[in-house]
Amino acid sequence: MTFDFAFFEKSAEYVRGRAPFQPEIAIVLGSCLGPFADSIQNPVSIDYAEIPNFLISTAPSHAGKLIFGTVAGRRVVCMSGRFHYYEGYDFEQLTIPVRLFKLLGVKATILTNAAGAINTAYRPGDVMIVSDHIKMTGASPLRGANISEFGDRFFDTTQMYTPELREIARECAKHSNLNVHEGVYFYFTGPQFETPAEIRAARILGGDAAGMSTVTEALTAAHCKMPLLALSVMTNMAAGVLDAPLSTEEVDRTGEKIAHEFSAYLTQIIQKIGETI
């Protein structure tokens, strides 16, 4: 498979022909956060399977649809379902969604995810604004020939999680019933949950939450200089923090419990970002 500019443009050309408008803000919904999609007004959906050169979401709680509509008066495109390395995709393939956003003219992207709390001051149901991440896998989604139309071969990640958008999220948190922190996301490839020893090591290295997504999309956004915000929902305490096994059922229960409040928080953030772009 050849990942050149024409490969990504083929996806964008198809989506432009189906989309009702040029979106301003893109949102990627993580595990258990799909209910936010129900709040999108005047939705127009495109199944991932219909988009040339796109990927198929196989995670059970991911709908697998690209949804266009409005939220708080802003034109958005929402991915209800995302892609992960553990599904069998190469890291290079995981650049596809954010590069599609770039070609559609999106001005800012919001990534959301479900994560395990490494920081023992966090609790299930809390939200973390991602200030930075740690990735120890060595692989990068930008491996291979550089596509200069998207960005430079060597690019800066110092402000990958855009400070101005994080400030908006902090301000919106003041008007939310959610308990909102700011911290470091530690990326693991999955699909198995992390071991207690891995979580202890991640805590020593400065990680506050553990998850299996977001980082490949964030790096792709940094490569193409896309303003980015990432939000992690603590759906459980990470392995070994409590004397209990981890399960997807716990993740689902927490996601359902805070779905309404998180959707309201995200809507307010979208409104405020829309006023600045």
Image: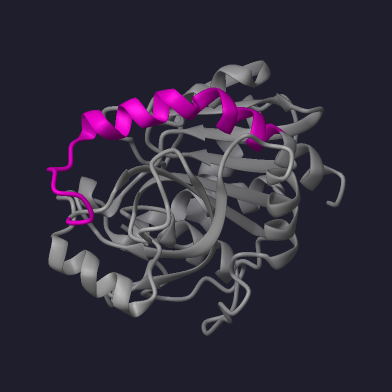
Give the magenta range. Answer: 240-267
Quarter-of-image position of residue 250: top left
Most extreme residue toward the bottom, as rendered?
A: 154
Residue 117 magenta-highlighted: no
Does residue 170 sit above or below 132 in this rendering?
A: above
Horizontal placement of 151 versus 47: left or right? Answer: right
114 or 106: which is nearer to us? 114
Residue 248 magenta-highlighted: yes
Residue 28 in view of the camera: yes
Here the colouring is one colour
**Residue at horizontal 31%, vertical 53%?**
212
Does residue 248 sit above or below 45 in this rendering?
A: below
**Residue at horizontal 75%, vertical 50%?**
171
Residue 52, horizontal then vertical, whole percent: 44, 37
Residue 23 in view of the camera: no
Does residue 134 sit above or below 179 in this rendering?
A: below
Residue 240, horizontal then vertical, whole percent: 17, 56
Horizontal placement of 261 versus 55: left or right? Answer: right
**Residue at horizontal 64%, vertical 37%?**
266
